[in-house]
């Protein structure tokens, strides 16, 4: 079994470069299918989720290989339009291939996606929107069969600003005849990054980052070279780690505007933060105070993916902080593991009340999901003794060189194979 072992009590000091965004590169890898050419994806993080996307692309007939931090994807030849159940179950983002394959070939067969068990994340929004574009979608024994005689641009209103549905509509609409206008679109920076990639390929997409996105379909596309934006959730995790452990850390290559809700919360907790020209510097004395209630919401609100790591940073804070999880109903699965370390957290429905404690103790805990696993490491950095985190395959889905980066910052941490 693989573990991450953390010995707490060491302040962090130093500088690291933040990895490329997981939630940006996955839809971009699906979007390479539309190009029908060679795409170079720079600053591509080496994650297990990226490996899953690579396996799907290769299964479809594409050529994919690494050149240092650049992933080269040649989608000139596409031999299949189906994705096996085992591949779909590896990650939630696998559903993003639906819109891209449908736009290029006009037919897709795939099962429902997998991923972390965070509660219902229905893809009904995706399917309804694609039907509006002219897709005929049927289900048989958990397998979706989608085909079309030709996608047509239209006006679509999402009932919720779903990130995945927004991305799927954009990709499918690139292959539709005419103009598609998407209302109540998700506004995440990763969607703006997807738009930038598509435009470099020759697509005409505008408005990403706002609630209305306009896609002019049937533009001839080609390969391109694109650098993925920094991962704001990985950045938030390192900031939470620095806040909890104390010390001074500097994050390079990250847009501070994408992290404003997180940095505001950490500033309120007592950290000193300086942001300038894609650099964020955080100083903490390790003695944090409780902050105003944190309510997760779609971007530009507080990100649900940063809720667990901020909670972990505040476990020894002075006072009480309330968290309200408005996105996923099972997002508190890490709490039971944190309480094993001595945390005082009470949960009622979507509300978690964190009462700061004087000390945490290292023990054996299990990662229950990606961000919850990272939260256990953040807690371990401020605990007395050694914390052993198991099920680290969850963490490796979203963090590139996590242990190495924390080691570089001065943490006493290691990955072990037992």
Image: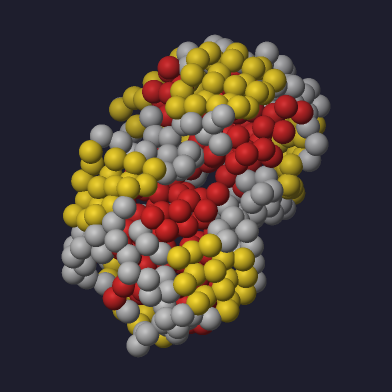
> Residue placed farthest to the bottom in the image?
149
Q: Using the rendered image of the protein, determine whether residue 125 is visible from the camera's viewpoint.
A: yes
In the rendered image, the vertical position of residue 329 relative to residue 138, given as above or below: above
As drawn, 15 above or below 239: above
**Residue 98 shows up from this direction:** no
Viewed as shown, does residue 12 lie left or right of 301? left
Q: Position of residue 289 (x, y in %)?
A: 77, 24
Quadrant where the N terminus is found in the figure:
top left
Q: Does residue 247 sit above or below 332 in this rendering?
A: above
Q: Which residue is depicted at the point 50% across and 15% down?
A: 14
**Residue at coordinates 48% horizontally, 31% vertically from top-left?**
253
Q: Residue 346 vs residue 81: left or right?
A: right
Identify the image's colour scheme: rainbow, by chain, secondary structure or one colour.
secondary structure
Q: Residue at x 41, y 59 (%)?
A: 198
Residue 120, percent across and down? 56, 62
Residue at point 54%, 31% (across, down) = 278
Quadrant of the frame with the C terminus:
top left
> Residue 31 versus residue 338: which sits nearer the camera?
31
| Residue 398 rendering spot, x and y as whole percentages | 43, 41
Residue 69, image x, y percentages = 30, 36
Q: How many marks?
A: 0
Q: Toward the viewer: 297 or 149? A: 149
Q: Is residue 109 left or right of residue 188?
A: left
Residue 285 sits in quarter: top right
């Amino acid at each position: 079994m693989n573990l991450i072992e953390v010995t707490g009590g060491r302040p962090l000091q130093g500088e690291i470069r933040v990895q490329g965004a997981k939630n940006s590169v996955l839809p971009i890898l699906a979007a390479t299918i539309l190009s029908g050419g060679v795409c170079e994806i720079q600053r591509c993080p080496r994650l297990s989720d990226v490996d899953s996307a690579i396996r799907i692309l290769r299964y479809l007939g594409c050529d994919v290989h690494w050149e240092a931090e650049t992933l080269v994807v040649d989608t000139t030849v596409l031999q299949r339009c189906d994705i096996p159940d085992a591949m779909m179950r590896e990650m939630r983002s696998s559903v993003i291939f639906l819109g891209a394959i449908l736009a290029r070939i006009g037919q897709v067969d795939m099962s429902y996606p997998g991923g972390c068990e965070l509660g219902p994340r229905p893809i009904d929004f995706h399917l309804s929107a694609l039907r509006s574009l002219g897709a005929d979608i049927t289900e048989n024994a958990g397998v979706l069969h989608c085909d079309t005689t030709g996608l047509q641009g239209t006006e679509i209103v999402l009932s919720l600003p779903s990130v995945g549905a927004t991305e799927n509509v954009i990709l499918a609409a690139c292959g539709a005849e005419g103009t598609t206008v998407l209302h109540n679109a998700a506004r995440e920076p990763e969607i703006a990054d997807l738009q930038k990639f598509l435009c470099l390929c020759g697509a005409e997409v505008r408005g990403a980052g706002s609630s209305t996105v306009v896609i002019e379909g049937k533009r001839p596309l080609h390969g391109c070279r694109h650098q993925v934006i920094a991962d704001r959730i990985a950045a938030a995790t390192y900031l939470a780690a620095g806040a909890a452990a104390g010390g001074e850390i500097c994050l390079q290559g990250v847009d501070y505007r994408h992290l404003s809700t997180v940095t505001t919360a950490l500033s309120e907790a007592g950290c000193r933060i300086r942001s300038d020209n894609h650099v964020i510097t955080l100083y903490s004395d390790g003695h944090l105070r409780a902050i105003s209630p944190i309510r997760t919401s779609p971007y530009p609100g507080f990100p649900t993916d940063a809720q667990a790591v901020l909670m972990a940073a505040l476990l020894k804070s002075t006072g009480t902080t309330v968290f309200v999880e408005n996105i996923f109903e099972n997002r508190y699965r890490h709490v039971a593991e944190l309480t094993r370390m001595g945390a005082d957290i009470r949960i009622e429905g979507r509300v978690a009340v964190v009462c700061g404690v004087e000390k945490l103790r290292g023990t054996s805990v299990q990662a229950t999901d990606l961000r919850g696993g990272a939260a256990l490491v953040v807690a371990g950095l401020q605990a007395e003794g050694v914390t052993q985190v198991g099920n680290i395959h969850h963490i490796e889905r979203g963090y590139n060189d996590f242990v190495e980066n924390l080691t570089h910052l001065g943490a006493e941490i290691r990955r072990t194979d037992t």
